[in-house]
Image (cartoon, coloured by chain):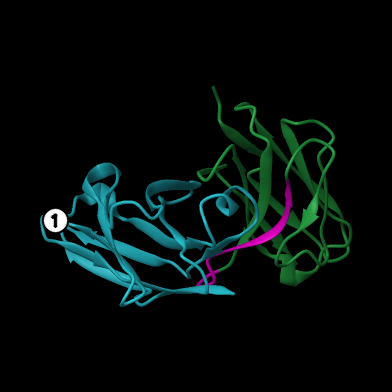
Chain colours: A cyan, B green
Amino acid sequence: AQSVTQLDSHVSVSEGTPVLLRCNYSSSYSPSLFWYVQHPNKGLQLLLKYTSAATLVKGINGFEAEFKKSETSFHLTKPSAHMSDAAEYFCVVSKNIKEAAGNKLTFGGGTRVLVKP
Amino acid sequence: NAGVTQTPKFRVLKTGQSMTLLCAQDMNHEYMYWYRQDPGMGLRLIHYSVGEGTTAKGEVPDGYNVSRLKKQNFLLGLESAAPSQTSVYFCASSYYYEQFFGPGTRLTVL
């Protein structure tokens, strides 16, 4: 069994300041982990993925995430928030990279990011 | 290249009515999925398909049926809508690990 907990349902930051979105996972296996972003009234878009290679993963739009097995965490960060980062972010876990192409994705509850000018 | 498209974008149903949601993808992907999104619960998988002519149940399949008669299309049906099915429905397709999502259908059941 696997599960994902996003520790903050809402995060508010000022433009130009760092963003931190926290995600903890539970898995009986060495998981694959993903962050997806959903802009208002849009579908989800893949930001980045961890697939057991480098533990620090860089994604699109300046985001990065670090896989920490000892802490079972996969937090998402960005050094400087932009107004266009206002969106909802989902942390997603899969049993392994092959099963990510099937039905084995488990989504966190989402973190809504507000960026203040 | 339209990616994943969904029809309709919005719909209001009365309890007991039926409807079909259409998902189409032009990326030649084998895998297709239907999810529902409810506040604070992320996305939950309803049904999925690993290829033309195949379907399988996901996490929350009750009250829904699906069909994949053509590789590019994946239909989601509600035979007798209930207020608990008020939600935003997303279709997705994938070739490997990355899933590509449609823009969603907002369904309200009164």
Instruction: Name the secondary structure under disc 1.
Output: loop
Q: Position of residue A109 (x, y in %)?
A: 48, 70
Mark 1 is surrounded, within 10 Å at the Cα level, by few (under 14), some (14 to 19) or many (20 or more) other residues, namely few
Residue at image mark 1? A79
Q: Is residue A5 above or below residue B14?
A: below
**Which contiguous range is marked in magenta?**
B39-49
Q: Is residue A59 left or right of residue A93?
A: left
Q: Is residue A12 above or below residue A43?
A: below
Q: Position of residue A63 (x, y in %)?
A: 25, 51
- Mainly helix, strand or loop, the magenta region? strand
- The one of B106 and A49 positioned closer to us in this rendering: A49
Q: Quadrant of residue B67?
A: top right
Extreme residue in the top direction: B1
Q: Position of residue A99 (x, y in %)?
A: 59, 53
Residue at 34%, 71% in the rendered image: A69
Question: Quarter of the image containing the C terminus of chain B?
Answer: bottom right
| Kind of residue indicated by mark 1 | Pro
- The one of B104 and A101 positioned closer to us in this rendering: A101
Extreme residue in the left direction: A16
